[in-house]
Amino acid sequence: MMETKKQIVLLAGTKETRIALSNQLQSILGDYFHIRSYSSEEMLPTQLENEIVILSSYLIKREVAHCLSESCRVITARRTVNYEYIDQLLQLPEGTNVMCVNDFPQTVEQSIQTLIHLGINHLKYHPYYPGIPHYQHADIAVTPGEMHLVPKEVKRIINIGVRLIDITTITEILGELGVLDDRATGISERFTEKIIQLSKKLAQANQKALQLNEHLDKVLNGVNDGILSFDHTGKITVFNEELKNIFLTDSKQAVGKHIKQIIKDKELLHFLTDTASEPSDQFFTINDTNYMVHRFALPAENTVIATFKNTSTTISMEKAARYELKRKGYIGKYYFSDIVGDSEAIVQTKNIAKKLAVTDLSLLLQGESGTGKELFASAIHNESSRRNGPFLAVNCSALPEDLLESELFGYEEGAFTGAKKGGKQGLFEQAEGGTIFLDEIGDISVKLQTRLLRVLQEKELRRVGGTRVLPIDVRVISATNKDLASDIKKGLFREDLYHRLNVLYLKIPALRERKEDIPLLLNHFLAIRTSKKMKVENDVLGLLINRTWTGNIRELKNAIDYMLAVSENENFTVKDLPQEAMRINNDERVYTAETFKETAATSEEIPLIAPNEEAAIISCIYRNYLSGKASSRKSLLSDLEAQSVKLSEAQVRFRLDLLERKGFVVKSKGRRGTRLTENGLVYIKNELESS
C-alpha cells in the first residue's frame, strides 16, 4: 500500500518569494512531502490545524498570526543567498562599490551580512531601502528581486534572486517530520548537487576568462607596435612582445615591475609619467631606432597606455596608403598635352603654368566658369615634383559649410551626430605629399577661411572635434571666377587668406579671347564623341566663331553634344545648332542659314565688303600663309597697294573685323598676325577655281 505523503505549508509575504521558496522546497523535498504555499500579497488560508508551517521570515509573523492555531508546528526559515546567481558577484573586481537594495532596513542588513559571511567580502556594500535618509551612490546595485526599488541613476542592476532557505532550516524541517533516515541522505545529495552545479558554472566562466586572456595576449603580441600600460603606482600591467624587441627585456620579466626598472631614458620616462590627461605624441630614439610614442590615460582605471610606432615602418605604410589613394582615382587625370589650342593666348598661359608647376608655392587660378581651371590644376600637379602623390579636387560651392569643413579637415569619433566610429580623414590628410585643388574658393564662409588660413600658415591642422595637431605636406591650388579683390573690400573675403592663396597667380583666358582655337576644339571634341567623320558647313563654323561663349569651353562642348544628338547625317548644318549658339554676340535674333547669308550681305552687324576688296585681302593673307609669313595690317597695306587696292590702315582694320565676324579669318596679336579659318581657305579655293 502506497504511503501517504506528509504535508508542509509555506507562508510568504510576496508572490515572488512564495514561488521561489516553493520551487526550492519542491526540488529538494518534493519526492517525499506534499508542499502547499500561500502569500499575504495574494491570499492566505483559513486557520491551519496540526500542520508543519514554514514562515519565509520572522517579519511576516504578525501578518499570518490569525491563520495559525496552537496545534501547528511553526518553523521560521533562515535564508541565504541564491547560489544560482552568485557568479555575477564573484566576477566583479575587488573593491567595487555596490548598493545593496531591499525593502526594509533589516532585510538589507541581513543580505549584506549573509554575503560577507559566505565569503563574498571583496566588494564594498552600501545599504539602500525606501525612505533611507542618506545613502552613498554606486553605479552597480545588487538586489534579491527588488529591482523596482533601485534608484534610477544606477547604471547596472545585478538581480541575485529571492534569498533561499538554508540547509539548517531544511534539516530542522526533516527533524520536525521525523524522517532523518535514508531519505535525508538523498535530500543532502540534491542540495550538494546544486552546489556542484554552481562550481561548474564558475569553472566554465573562469575557463572562458582564461581563453579570452590568451586571445588578447596573442592580439597584443601580434601587432607591429609596442604596447605598454602601467597603473598609477608605476607598476607595469601590459608589456607586449614588440616592446621586448625595443627595450631588450622579456615581457614576463617586465610585467609587475615598476616602469623605472625597465625604462632608463629620463626624457622618455618624464613623457610617459606626465600627469597631463590630454593624449600626446613625441619622437624618441631608442637603441638607435626612431619611434613615435603616443601616450593617453584611462582615468577611470588609473592607467596610462603608450604605443611605440617605428617611424620607418610608418613611412612605408604612408607610401602604400598614397599608392592606394592613387589607385582609387585620387590622381591628376590631365596633362598639358590635353589642353587643346595653339592660339597665342593659350600657348603663353601654358608656358607660364609649366614654370609655376616646378615650385611648391600656393597658386591661385583666375578664370571664368568653363575655361578649364581644374584641367590646368591637374596639369600643373602632373608637371610638379608631387606628380607621384595624390591629387584631390573639391568644389567649395557644392557643399554646405559644416559638411565642407568635415570633408576638408576630417573629424574625430563623436564630433557630431552621425560621425563615423573611429572618425574620418579629411581631404587635406588624404592629399598628404600631393596637391589639393580648391575650386570656387571665393564661395567659402569666413569661418572656413579662418581655418584654411591656419592650415596654410602653420602647415598643420586639427580635425573637427579633435585635440591632436597633425602636420601636413600639401600644395594648395585654388581657383575662382570671382573678383576676390572686390570681395575683400566688401568684407566677404579675408585679405590675409587672399595673399596666402595668391602667392602665385595664373589667368586662364576666356574662349572669346582665343577664338582661333575653336576649330581645333571642335575637331577635338568630335573625335572624342564620335567615330564618324563629321563635316561642318561654313555658316556653322562662322556662327561658332562669332559666338560670345559666356560659358566658354564647357558651353562649346555642350553645343557640340547637342549637334551630334540632333543631326540626321554626317554633316552639321545651321539648323543643328542649339538656339543659344545661333545668336551672334548675344543678339536676341536667331540666325538660320538664310538669315545669316542675308545678314552677311545687308545687315549693319556684318556689312558687305566690296568683292574686289574682300578677295584681295583674303588672297594676300593666303599668299602669306603659303610662304610662312605673318599677315599684319602693315604688311597687308603694302600687299594691297601692289594690287592697286588703295585702303588706309583704319579701313584694313575695319575690313579685317568684318571678315572675322563672317568667319573667314582669325586675328591674333603679335607675330602670329591674321590667319585664315577653314571657311576662309574654302573661300579662296573657290575663288581660284572660278578664276
Image: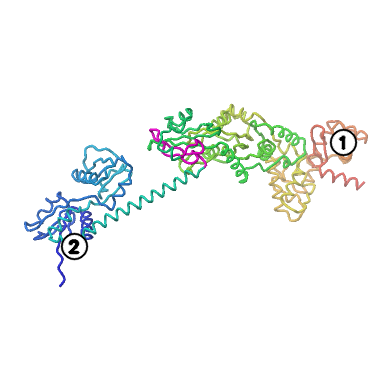
Viewer-side label of 2, 1: 2
Residue 448 visible in the shown view: no
Q: Position of residue 80 (x, y in %)?
A: 22, 50
SS label for mark 2: helix
**On screen, residue 39 above or below 515:** below
Q: Amino acid at mark 2?
A: Arg
Which quarter of the picture shows residue 679?
top right
Residue 376 point in image, percent of width and height: 68, 38
- Residue that label 2 marks: 183
Q: Residues within 10 Å of mark 1 (few under 14, many from 20)?
A: some
**Magenta span:** 224-250
**Residue 647 percent location from the top left of the image:** 88, 33
Residue 419's x, y, as percent? Answer: 48, 42
**Quadrant holding the N terminus:** bottom left
Res 358 visible: yes
Image mark for residue 495:
none
In front: 27, or 680? 27
Along the horizontal axis of the image, is 300 left or right of 526?
left
Tag 2 and tag 1, C-beta contact below 8 Å: no
Q: Does the stretch in magenta take in 118?
A: no
- State left or right for residue 156 relative to residue 650: left
Decide which of 603, 86 is in the foreground and name it.
86
Residue 441 occupies quadrant: top right
Cα distance in 3D space between marks 2 and 1 = 128 Å
Q: Amino acid at mark 1?
A: Lys
User: Could you tell which of marks 2 and 1 lies nearer the N-terminus?
Assistant: 2
> Is 238 covered by the magenta stretch?
yes
Residue located beneath label 1 in the image: 629
